[in-house]
Amino acid sequence: MTKITWFGHATIGVETADYKLLIDPYFTGNPSASAAASNINADFILVSHGHGDHIGDTIDIAKRTGAKVISNYEIINWLGKQGLENLHAQHLGGGFQHPFGYLKLTLALHGSQLPDGSYGGNPCGFLLTLNDGKTIYLAQDTGLFGDMALIGEEDLDLAMIPIGDNFTMGPDDALRAVHLLQPQVVVPIHYNTFALIEQNADEWAEKVIAETTTKAVVMVPGEELNLDD
Ligand code: NI
Ligand code: MN
C-alpha cells in the first residue's frame, strides 16, 4: 500500500512499505503548510532544486531524523558543507535502486539557486517506481516540455504537477501536460500558496476530467491519497 500526503505547496509525503519519503519539505514560513517541520518523520528526503520553497526545512529534518537526502550533485555537495552526512547524489536521466524502489531524476525547466546564492545545478523532477509496482511522477517546479510524452510512456499511476503559473506551468499548460503524461490520477500542486500563484484548482480539474481519461483529484493541505483505492 502506498499513501500520498500533500502537505501544501510542493511538499509531498510518500509512505510505501516500510519507508517514508518526504519531497521538497517546505514547512517553516509556508503559508499553506499543514504541519510543522518538527513533527515530520522521514527515512528519505528528495530535493528537486535549490529554491527556498523546496530545500525548505531539509537540513533541520535530516539532522533530527537521520534521513538520507537525495538530490542533484551540486545540492548534495552543498548539503555536505552544511554538515549533513547521509547523502546520495544523482543527476538528470540517472536512476538508482533505493530500498523503497527505483528513482530517476527527470528534466525540469526551471532554476535552482540555493538560499545563500550558491549554484544549485539543474532542477529536476522525480520518477518513482516503487517496490509495490506503483509508478509516480512528481514534476515539482517546471514549465511544460514536450518530453513529458516520454515520461507518459511509463504507465503512470499518479502525477503531481504544478498549476500555479508565474514560476511554473499554469493551468493551460498543465492541462497539456496531462495529455502528454496520461496518468491514471493527477493532483495539482504549487498553487494558492502566495497571491502570485492563485488558481482555481476545481475548475482546472473539471477541464482535465472533461478532456482526458485522467482522474483529477484536488487535495487540501494535509489530505492523504491511498493509491490502492
Ligand atoms: Ni522553484
Ligand atoms: Mn517553487
Image: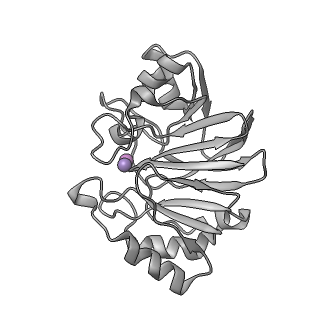
Camera sees residue 199: yes
**Residue 50 location, quadrant:** top left
Colouring chosen for the image of the structure: one colour
Residue 109: x and y, percent?
45, 56
Residue 145: x and y, percent?
51, 66
Q: Residue at x 44, y 48 (%)?
A: 222
In the orientation shown, which residue stands out farthest toward the left? 195
**Residue 28 location, quadrant:** top left
What is the total number of numbered labels drawn onto the structure image?
0
Q: In the rendered view, would you say 87 is above or below 199? A: above
- In front here: 212 or 221? 221
In the orientation shown, which residue stands out farthest toward the bottom? 210
Look at the image and tell me in which quarter the C terminus lies: bottom right
Q: In the rendered view, would you say 51 is above or below 81? A: below
Side (left or right) of 210 relative to 59: right
Q: In the rendered view, would you say 128 is above or below 84? A: below
Residue 226: x and y, percent?
63, 55
Q: Residue at x 51, y 67 (%)?
A: 217
Q: Residue at x 35, y 44 (%)?
A: 33
- In front here: 32 or 50? 32
Residue 25: x and y, percent?
44, 37
Side (left or right) of 168 relative to 100: left
Camera sees residue 126: no
- In front here: 101 or 5? 5
Side (left or right) of 87 relative to 24: right
